Amino acid sequence: MMSIRLSDEMERRLSDLAARTGRTKAYHVVELIEEHIDDLEDRYLAEARLEKRRPPLSGEQLRKNLGLDR
């Protein structure tokens, strides 16, 4: 169980959508979450990786790290 606060505008839009489709507001909220949770998880994972990003490597450092510095 969960409760959320929506702006008046978002509440109106969700109510209108529910009325037009004959589905409940909860149905549409669940649909939105299920369709977009993967994108949100990917986004936050990418942002976390960027925050921990190491300094860039030079070409020479990269070749050395890959064992190509013969």
Image: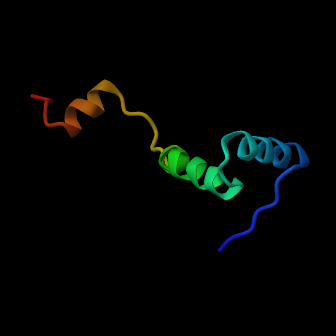
Q: Which residue is found at the position 87% from the left and 49% from the top?
A: 7
Q: Which residue is found at the position 82% from the left and 60% from the top?
A: 5
Total marks shown come to 0
Residue 51 image offset from top left, x and y in percent: 55, 47
Task: Please state which of residues 30 and 25 is positioned toward the viewer in this rendering.
Answer: 25
> Is 15 positioned to the left or the right of 42 in the image?
right
Task: Please state which of residues 27 and 35 is positioned toward the viewer in this rendering.
Answer: 27
Residue 2: quarter of image: bottom right
Task: Please state which of residues 32 and 15 is positioned toward the viewer in this rendering.
Answer: 15
Residue 16 image offset from top left, x and y in percent: 79, 41
> Is 9 positioned to the left or the right of 60 in the image?
right
Residue 33's place in the image compared with 64, above or below, is below
Q: Residue furthest front?
A: 22
Q: Which residue is found at the position 15% from the left and 30% from the top?
A: 69
Q: Residue furthest left?
A: 70
Q: Which quadrant would the N terminus be assigned to in this image?
A: bottom right
Q: Residue furthest right?
A: 8
Residue 37 image offset from top left, x and y in percent: 52, 51
Query: Can residue 40 be seen in this snapshot?
Result: no
> Is 34 positioned to the left or the right of 16 in the image?
left
Residue 12: quarter of image: top right
Colour scheme employed for the rendering of this structure = rainbow
Query: Can residue 36 be seen in this snapshot?
Result: yes
Residue 44 image offset from top left, x and y in percent: 55, 49
Q: Which residue is found at the position 71% from the left and 54% from the top?
A: 25
Q: Residue furthest top?
A: 59
Q: Which quadrant would the C terminus be assigned to in this image?
A: top left
